[in-house]
Image: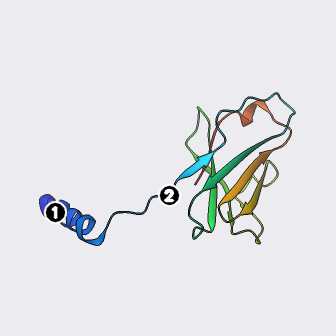
Amino acid sequence: MMYGICGLCVFFVLFLGKANCVKVEQTPLLQATETSDVTIHCRHDDSTLLVMLWYKQNSRTVMSLIGYTTGTTSDPNYEDGYENLFNLGRKSTTEGSLTISNLRQSDSAVYYCA
């Protein structure tokens, strides 16, 4: 049965075309001092993708969703507890940002946009 499913997947990939890939770029490693402000920029190459999500992962927890923006005209949507800690911005459909104001030690983490 497993071979049948794998064969079906190969069939769809070969005959329906390759999967779409989106190139995502964001600010590389940042270092900042406590109480300063920092902005992480994100850019992708597909203007049909309206939603931009932001995640945080520190060394002690699993990755968690901070929030997301939809297009350039709607207000950001934050997960509970994050609305006063972060500011999500959207310059265009393909460009966004995450700003952390008044940095604290607990803000030390890896941040991802998607």
Q: Is the residue marked by circle 1 packed among few (<14), some (14-19), or many (20+) residues within 10 Å?
A: few
Q: Is residue 73 above or below residue 96?
A: below
Residue found at x 24% / y 70% = 15
Of 99 and 107, the residue lying toward us? 99
Q: Is residue 37 above or below residue 79?
A: above
| Quadrant of the image occupied by residue 1 | bottom left
What is the x, y in percent for residue 101? 84, 42
In the structure shown, which secondary structural element does the residue marked by tag 1 occupy? helix
Residue displayed at 75% across by 60% down: 91
Please state the total of marks drawn on the protein image: 2
Q: Is residue 94 left or right of residue 22?
A: right
Please tell me which residue lies in front, 27 or 59.
27
Secondary structure under tag 2 reads loop
Say the numbered circle drawn on residue 22.
2
Q: Amino acid at mark 1?
A: Gly
Q: Nearer the viewer, residue 16 or 77?
A: 16
- Earlier in the chain: of badge 1 and badge 2, it is 1
- Colour scheme: rainbow
Measured from the top left, where is residue 79 in percent x and y?
69, 57
* Cα distance between the residues tagged 1 and 2: 26 Å
Residue matched to label 1: 7
Would residue 62 be visible to someone looking at this image?
yes
Amino acid residing under circle 2: Val
Residue at image x 56%, y 64%?
Answer: 46
